[in-house]
Each structure stands twice: as structure tokens, then as C-alpha cells.
Amino acid sequence: MSVTDAAVQEDVSRSPAERITNDFAIQVATVNGSGSQTANLVLLRSIFQMGVPVSGKNMFPSNIAGLPTWYTIRASAKGYIGRKKEVDFLVAMNPETAREDVLTLPPGAAAVYDEPLKLKELRNDVTFYPVPFDKLISAITHDAKLRRLVRNMIYDGVLARLLSIDMGQMEKALRKQLGKKEKAVVLNMGALKAGYDFAEANLTKQDPFVVEPMNKTTGMILIEGNAAAAIGCMMAGVTFVGWYPITPSSSLCESLIDYLKKYRRDPETGKATYAVIQAEDEIAALGMVIGAGWMGARAMTSTAGPGISLMSEFTGLGYYAEVPAVIFDVQRVGPSTGLPTRTAQQDVLSTAVLSHGDTKHPLLLPASVAECYSMAMDAFDLAERLQSPVFVLSDLDLGMNTWMAHPFDYPTKPHDRGKRLDEETLKRVGEFARYRDVDGDGIPYRTVPGDGMPAYFTRGSGHNEKAQYSERADDYANNLDRLAKKFETARTLVPRPEIEQHGRGGIGLIAYGTTHWAIVEARDQLKFEEGLETSYLRLRAYPFTTEVGEFIESCDRIYVVEQNRDGQMLSLLKMECTLEQFSKLRSIRHYVGLPIDGRSVTTDVLKQEGR
Amino acid sequence: MATPEQPAAPAKKLNRIGLEPVVYRGSKTTLCAGCGHNAITERIIDSFYDLGIDPSQVIKLSGIGCSSKAPAYFLGSAHGFNSVHGRMPSVGTGAVVANRKMMAIGISGDGDTGAIGIGQFVHLMRRNLPIIYIIEDNGCYGLTKGQFSPTADLGSTLKTGVVNDLPPIDTCALAVELGASFVARSFSGDPKQLKAILKAAISHRGTCMIDVLSPCVTFNDHEGSTKSYSYVKDHEEPLGDISFVPFYEDINIEYDPGTTTAVTLHNGSKVLLTKIAEDYHPTDKMSALRLLHETAARGEYATGILYVEPDKQDFVELLGLVDEPLAFLDQARTRPGKAALDEIMESFR
């Protein structure tokens, strides 16, 4: 098994004299549970500290220990932080996958490997660097457990030497990673140094890849999307969290718990200004959120696809009872066992219309860690403004991988608590009717228990505008029409798309979420390699704002690029398009469980363009 | 809960907080005439009126089914939420935690609790969430016209002659075992006992699980049903005569020291139970479980307060929340300052 879906790409053999600076991908192949995460993050961080744009992608199995895992670090002077599927520099530590890992390298690549694996004979178009890891580690410690833990740090040292990564930055990154554990720092530094010294004494640099200092990461941070979202939720003033553990969303609530414990205690009493409940399942998690939202709390949950399925019924109730709820869906590959640790954009259609009955829900579509942060705040405001469940569709790639970003801005916008009935409004409207469209925007006024305002009885679909039980046809239809009107209001409130228009006519691209990073790169490839200029619209929300239709109008043909099999966003677009717009839409789909890359998009566009 | 204060001598038709009985009523019932659930509704109205609980400080919750329609029929000026089948416990959990000042009463049924909702029921009991959780237990699915529920007794029959061949779930035994701090069973046709239990429950802080046998007059009140009026009347075993002493009235009760057990409730009020057996202690889990098993083996229902753990920490206390309702915290309390964000950002550099 190999993680790469690249197979052997087009021949890009390079002469040994050529230097490739700050533009390559390192892949570390290890066994899950072997403690490679520290070594990988130190490697990533030290390149980042040298001012070189990086991205790190962990491709790990659904397993705690024993199965193969790969970590890819991409350095890109141009700032491309999407996935690069071609591996330039392999670190082969896993006997199970080493052979295939080497066989799938493109010509001209390099490989550091554990000497006993004897990989050298496999290829003659790859530079090999054998390293006797066990021999080197035995000189550092005799403790078997410690040996296993710091063994991986040796390859960091070897790579520091081979790729010219500053050892001072390595040490700084290691200290950052290990915190104040001085004993661990000393031990790991020993391993790092052993690797470096070995490489210096025994390995002759033959590959073209080098890291050189730049100034492109000054002031930036490295963060995972789930942590970013958690910070956003805390700043959004979340007061209630109901959740159930599931990969890849668990770290969102776990980060949030840490932040809330630290920053959301009453300064005088030390008591919590929030509640977090680990529920018995996802049904209960959303049930609790609906209960808390109904009471007036800012309530959220976080889950992945299987949880979304279970939350279906409550989502529909939230829609009809008009209860605010924020639901993070960190998307992953399909149901049950198998690939729960792989990324996808497969829940777009199911979340947009989740539940039985006529329902549709706003979706926010973060593409970056910065948007995980800002859209968390948008989601709470929208949920209370619209009195409705609102989904934030992240994915495993964004949520669990490490991304560069500028530090997040402190929010200046006050929390929007939506339309709450007060004495003044009551006087103005004369009478409280929970589901009456007083303002013509489809959004009624609500009261919450304990606020001193009139009470009402909350149910699903069978009620009139006074929230009284009703099975009358006109009551039902009027309510549905008002809810549809509310959705039109949502269209004016959700984040607007980002558009880069290249004149009128020609090729347009539409994408969303993490697909964005592949588009950025593919557009450059199309432009600089093929002379093909493209326009681009990045969707940031559903329902679609008016710009989307205008963008489709402005292009001759539009490729909707996404990470699922059936073109789910394409389907949503088609539901709202005119026939003429519809005829312009084409589809590019990527569904291998690994993040989409720019080259795949470029290749597909060219193929469909007949070039 | 209402503020405990000494009431002025109430006018004839006002309770201690000056509200009329009609305030405690809800909309007109749409359940069948004679349905046991309506009798339970009446006792709820009486209990809340008698104790002078302000309806605006109460939330009513339910799942789906005949039972779950009931919250619309009492405390009309309280907020209510008729939620999802079997999932009222989760909605209740979120609601109670979001506003700890409100008193919560949830109405479920035997299908809503014992079948589709058993998972959430289990975890509600385990958390000891402060809520009065009533099962209006008729042993059948009324709203879908009479199918067996998981509390239907072994060997009971449907109108169509179908025999129930699986043993029932004893929700009281389950609740005792799982950690509910107040567990009782009563019968919809026994107003005196039911009202006393409800009043005790209103004064208890923690999960009050009350299983009320409530025969279905339409689908489950025939010969062969073990939840019919005649069967229950013949096989009910009252646990004790209960007199309830609310905390805002002088303690002035009749009781015989030799035959009663006094249980001090969380808020200082007391429930007195007349023992039916020399060694029965409602604060002893094992006694409660033994009694339930022994009476069940005889085909009888032990009614009354089966188990009370007055001082058990409830779920809201466990969470260590601020005193103000979470739902009403404003931005100043819930958005940390810029220094916090700066510190967090620094940790990612």
C-alpha cells in the first residue's frame, strides 16, 4: 500500500548540478504509534522559522499503533500550501511500505532510509542515503522505550544536514514542541545531533533540494483548523457545547475545552461561564444544543459525517421550531470503518438539506484556518439572527493539519443575538406571535424561558403563527413559505464569495473549502504553463449570494471543482441555476481520500478543454 | 423555583404567590376521554398550584406520543417544548444547563422512554439532572394505535389477541440502579398518592423519575392487559402513606414515629413515608431494588417513593457554573479580552 496516488509522473529528470531551492515535498513514512509526530513537526517548524512557506499534511490510518502513516511537508517559495502529490524527498522508516514508497517516487527524487531495508537496488534514478538508525540511537540511550521515542529525531538531523536546514532553528523548534521538559530536550537534541554528524561524515549531497532562508513567514503562526475554530467559538461567546468524540472533529471540542478552562472562568468566583457536555451520542449532542439554544444560550456541537447522519432529525426540528444551533462538520470519507482518517468534501448535499421534510440550511465553507476562526463567529451570529441551525463545513485536511496563517484579529463586531422580543417591540407589534413575520424578512421575534416575556409552546411543523397546534393546510403552507422567505434573507447575510475576475467570457472556476489551495496553484499552472487565464469564484457559503449567478453569466464555461464523487456542490448550483447557466457548468471531482492537488486540477481542466 | 418566603394569608382562590388556579391550566386536552394521562395532568396542575410555583419559572418538555402531548395541557404560561421521539432527555439537559434557575418537568411515555429513548433515559438518570421526569406508562403505543411497548408485561395481550412474549423493562429499577436521586411509582387513578409524590418531587433537586401507571382506555384497558384499570387496582401495592411537608409552611404533620421514615429533601423540606415493611428504607438502594423485584415477581406494583438520595450532587452543580443562567450571559462575560487572544496567538508562533 502506498499513500501516493501520483504513480510515476511525467519525466522530470534533473541534472545533479541543478539546485531546487525551497520548492519540494518531503514525505516521512513511518509506522503509526512510533512517535514520529514530534520529529515531523520539528522539521516543519524549523523550515517555517527559516521564513519559507510550508504546509504539513498527516496521512494517517484509523489505528493507534502499527499501521503505516505518512507525513508530508511541503516547502514552497511561491507560497503554495495545498498538497503536492509528487514526493521529492522520501524518508523511508517503515519496512512494510518502504518498497512501494520508493517505487512510486518520481525520477530525480531522493530517499533517506533505514539501512537494513536495502532499498538502494530498487531504482537507479533516485538518490539514496542509507542511515543506520539503530546503531546511531544505541549510542544515545540504552533505554528501549526512549530509543523508540527519539529514533525518529535522527532523520531530522540527517535532513538538516542534507537540506541545509539551520540546526539552531531545529533546536528552537524542538524546544517549542517539547515545552519545558528539559530532559526530553537534551535527549532529542542528542539524537538530532547524531543524525546531523552522521550525515556530515558519511553522506555526500547528490540531490538538488535545499532550504534557504526567506522572509515569507515573518509574524505568522502555525495552527490546525480545529484549534482555530475553537478559538473562534470561544470569542463568539459560546456558552454551551454538546459533543461526541469522532475523528476528525474531536480536536475541535478538545481544544475548545482547554481554552474555555483557561479563559472563560468568572474572574471573581472562578466558576465557568460555559458548559461542555460529552453526550452519549451525536443525537443527544445536538438534542442538548437545541435545548440550550431554545433557552437562549449560544450553543454548538462539532462532528463528522456519521454524526451528521444521526443529527438529521434534530436538525429538522431546529429548522421548524426555529432554534439557533451551530454545527461544525469536519468532513471525512464515508461511513463506518475504513477511511475515517481521510479527507473529503462529501457532506455538502446532505447538510444543505439535512432531515426529512422541506428543509434547507445555511452552510459556511471555510478554506483556511483564518476562516475557521472568523466563520465560527459568523456561524453563531447567523444562527441567532436566522433562528436556525447553521453548519460550518470544514474537513480533515483543514481541521487536523498544520497551516500557516497571520495571527487572527481580535473581533470588533459585537455578538448579534438576533431578534428577541422586548417590552418596546411588544408595544410596537401589539401582540406576541412566535412565528409571525412582523418585519417582512421571514424572521419572527422570539422569547426564551425566564426572560419575562410571553411564553409559547414549541413544536415541529404543525403550528400556526401563534405557535398553537394546527394541522390546517393554510397554516402549514404559510409557515413553509415564511421559512423559504427567511432563507432568502439568509442569502443576504451569509459571507459573500471571493472573486478574481479575468475579463468576460473564457474559463471560470468555482471551488470552496480546502479545494481553494489546489485552485490557486492550478490557475498559475494554467497561466504560466499553458497561457490560459481563468476567472475564479470561491464560494464561502450556501445559500448562494447574487454574485454566484453573475459570475456564471460572466464566463463561457465554468468548472466546479470539489472533493467528492458526484459533484455535490454542482448539484446545489444546478438547483438554483437558469437553464442557460446550467449549460455552462462542468465538473472536476477528486475523491481518493487525500487532499486535492493543483496538478490534478490543471490536468483535468486541460483534458476537458481538449488541450 | 419560586423564592421561599412566608406567604400572606392567601385569598380563597389564590395560592401563596397570588395566582389563580386557571394560571396553572393549559389548553384543552385532545387525549381520549378517561385517559389516565389527563388525571396525571390534573395532579400536576394541583401540585404546582398548591406549592405556589411560578409557571413562568418552569419549562415543560416532552418527546413524542400521547404522553408527550400532555405538557400543552398544564401550566399554559410556561414555555414548553414537544421535541423528538425518545430524545427529550437531551433537550432537557441542554435546557436545564443553559438556565439553571428554571424548574424543568418532562413528560414521557413508556415507548418514548423504554424503547426509542432508552439510551437517553439511561444517561439522564446517570447524570442526575435536576428535572422531574414522568413516564405516563400505559404499556402500549397509543398514538400509533396500540402496539406493545417495552413496559408491557409478559403474557399480556393486544386487542387483536397478539401475546407479548418479552419481559418488561422496569424503569424504576433501572432509574435506581443508574443514579436517579428520586424514584417513585404511582397510579393515575390514585390522586392522593400521586399528588404527594409530585409535591415531594418538586422540592427535590436532582432527577425525579416517576413512573405513573396510566391505563390506555382505548387500546390497553381490556381483559388480558396487565395495565388495565381493573388489573392495576387489584395488584397495586402502596408503599406507604405519604404526607409532604413543603418548606415554606410550618412543619405540622401527623405521623407515628414507629411507622414512618423521615427523609430530608435537598431544600430542607421533608417527605414522610409509612413503611410497609419493618426494614424498608427509601434511602437504601438495595432495599428499593429488592422491593421492586419481589413485588414484580408477585405481579404487583410497589407504589410510593421507592428511593431517595436527598443530598446527591446534581448535574448542574457538578458543572461548576456561574450563578447566572448561561443563556443570559452577555458579551462582556463571554468574549475574552484582546490579551487572551494575543496570548493564544503567541503560543502558535
Image (cartoon, coloured by chain):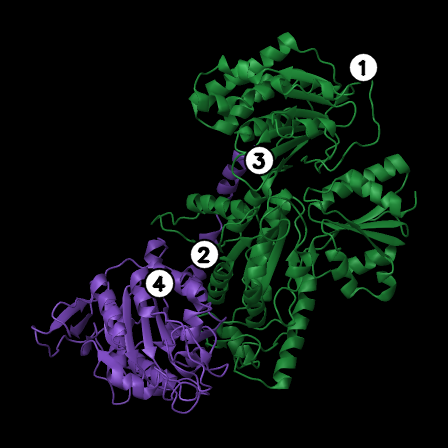
Chain colours: A green, B purple
Residue type, mark 2 in image: Ala
Q: Is residue A356 left or right of residue B81?
A: right
In the rendered view, tell whether residue B33 sits above or below residue A354: below
Q: Give the Cα separation between the discs numbered 4 and 1.
A: 72 Å
Q: Chain of mark 2?
A: A
Q: Going from the N terminus, do you reach mark 1 or mark 3 first?
A: 1
Crowding near the residue tagged with mark 4, few <14, some 14–19, many ≥20 C-alpha atoms within 10 Å: many
Q: Which residue is mark 3?
A: A67
Q: Which residue is mark 4?
A: B125
Q: Residue at x 25, y 88 (%)?
A: B11
Q: Which residue is mark 1?
A: A17
Camera sees residue A521: no
Q: Secondary structure at mark 3?
A: loop
- Both labels 1 and 3 in a single chain: yes
Q: Residue at x 58, y 38 (%)?
A: A223
Q: Nearer the viewer, mark 4 or mark 1?
A: 4
Q: Chain of mark 4?
A: B
Q: Secondary structure at mark 2?
A: loop
Q: Chain of mark 3?
A: A
- Both labels 3 and 2 in a single chain: yes
Q: Chain of mark 1?
A: A
Q: Give the Cα separation between the discs numbered 4 and 2.
A: 13 Å
